[in-house]
Image (cartoon, rainbow, N blue to C red):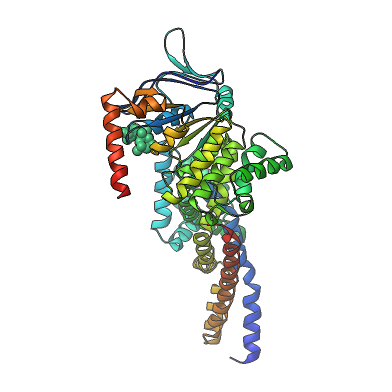
Amino acid sequence: MTSEEIRKVTGLLLEHLLPTLKVFGFTLLFSVPLGMIVALLKMCKFKPISWLTNVYILIMRGTPLMLQIILVRYLVPMLRINENTPEWLRNILLEINIAGDNYLFNMIIVAFVFNYAAYFAEIFRGGIESIPKGQYEAAYALSMTKTQTFFRIVLPQVIKRIVPASANEVITLVKDTSLANVVAYAEITLVANQQMQYYSSITPLVIAGVFYFVMSFVLTVLFALIEKKLNYYR
Amino acid sequence: MAILEVRNLSKKFDDVQVLKDISFDVNKGEVIAIIGPSGSGKSTLLRCINQFEKADGGEITVCDMDMLVKDSKDRTVFSDAKTLRDIRLKIGLVFQNFNLFPHMTVLGNIIEAPVKVLKTPKAEAVEKAMELLKKMGLSEKANAYPYELSGGQQQRVSIARALALNPEILFFDEPTSALDPELTGQVLKVIKELAEEKMTMVIVTHEMAFARDVADIVVFMDGGYIVEMGTPEKVFGNTENERTKQFLSRYNNDVMSADE
Ligand SMILES: Nc1ncnc2c1ncn2[C@@H]1O[C@H](COP(=O)(O)OP(=O)(O)OP(=O)(O)O)[C@@H](O)[C@H]1O
Ligand SMILES: [Mg+2]
């Protein structure tokens, strides 16, 4: 490839950084709070709820994210044409506008959010359960309320404990956004693939690789700083 | 004046009766030492009084507030949540493992409850905390984190933390059991000073010499019962009770062999 072509491809890939970042950002935005809720549901003392939550987590972590993306993307269209779909459901499904980019993007986010929430939930639950019973007892002996105990005593210690595992998850997510190309979402990997075929050169892939690497690297440094900041106690 | 009254307290875990017919009083300014073999129910007794466990039967009164009482039909009923909380505020507890909050400084640990629970102005809470730290001989450690302290220092901080809420009565569950022998002394010294200031205290301990030294009343528990209760002279000096004799002699032997 000529340097002119390389500049052109780099520009094109830069333009498609936004779709990639959109998947990354929206997934984080929703999967972290959802993961918190899922963690609490799994710790619920009412067994059926914690059991159901566990089934959800097992399925999300036990099947490929790429498969989940395809499934979510084609769920509604496939149910619409399936002859076994009950009429009332078909009518509801027909209301949904499945054409257009919005639908595609929304379905990708749904798949990513439910998948990542399961991973985050396990990290949060592990963090909460790793806080020694003595911390709760000390707070109780000091007449602190449950809310005070959670926000003043438990949560700060949980955050410190979950930062390393969460960092892993977030950095994995940067790279996992490339899976969205399987449903023809125009993000970096998809575009790089097209450009490779157009120019018969692997250079576009290398450039895309550099993009991912830089993003992961920045996040790695960022999390290292956070960890360091939280290192004032043991 | 009785700060704490316990009547016929009983507690079961599953099928095991851990506390049976426990009755005793603690008057203002008194120091009670509770001794007894492992598994005799000492911690469970403290945990029932501190509301970590729900007693099954009996009566507990703290500073004239009923924690649990018998109703007219002889059923054991707990007081309302507000009373239970008021009672908890009158009681301080020091744990065997200190249980300091690792993410807060020494000062932070001590002022947390006064500021958040009692709503004491921060400056006032800090002033009080510094006084307590001075008393504990830890003034220069106010801004240290718990991990930077020795076990003996951590335990003294946890005593200061309990005292910061101005409890009427302070409970200790084996305050020196997690400490090396050379650190035990510092903590016992602080407790002894509190006794001299007429702080009301109930101390579960395996330190017999200490119990003999500071306690007004020694309670010997075994198998969930209070087997014997009396002055240290009586319990350690000339007990008539076979079970107490047996426990103390085995204890003395252990101490002797440990000394060798
Ligand atoms: N949460 C619990 N569930 C079931 N059994 C318990 C529980 N807590 C204590 N026990 C049992 O109750 C009995 C009394 O225990 P407790 O901890 O009160 O004894 P202790 O006198 O404090 O002993 P130690 O000197 O070893 O601390 C023991 O047999 C113990 O196994
Ligand atoms: Mg015990």
In-front residue for pair A91/A48: A48
Answer whether residue B100 is visible to the viewer in this image.
yes
Residue A223 position, x and y percent, is 58, 65
Residue B238, quarter of picture:
top left
Nearer the observer, B125 or B180: B180
**Ligand 2 quadrant in view:** top left
Most foreground residue, B157 or A53: B157
| Residue A140 visible, this orientation | no
Residue at (26, 31) in percent of width and height: B246
Q: Is residue A97 above or below residue A228?
A: above
Work out whether residue A14 or residue A37 is closer to the camera in this orientation and state it: A37
Extreme-top residue of the structure:
B72
- Residue at 40% x, 58% y: name it: A63
Q: Is residue B135 left or right of residue B79?
A: right
Q: Is residue B14 left or right of residue B51?
A: left
In-image side of B141 versus A117 (left or right): right
- Residue at 56% across / 48% down in the picture? A155
- Please say if B99 is above or below A202: above
Image location (x, y in percent) of residue B21? 36, 19
| Residue B20 position in % (x across, y down) | 34, 22
Image quarter of residue B115 = top right
The quadrant of the rendering that contains the N terminus of chain B is: top right
List x then y, in percent, for residue A193: 52, 78
Question: How many numbered badges does the structure rendering display?
Answer: 0
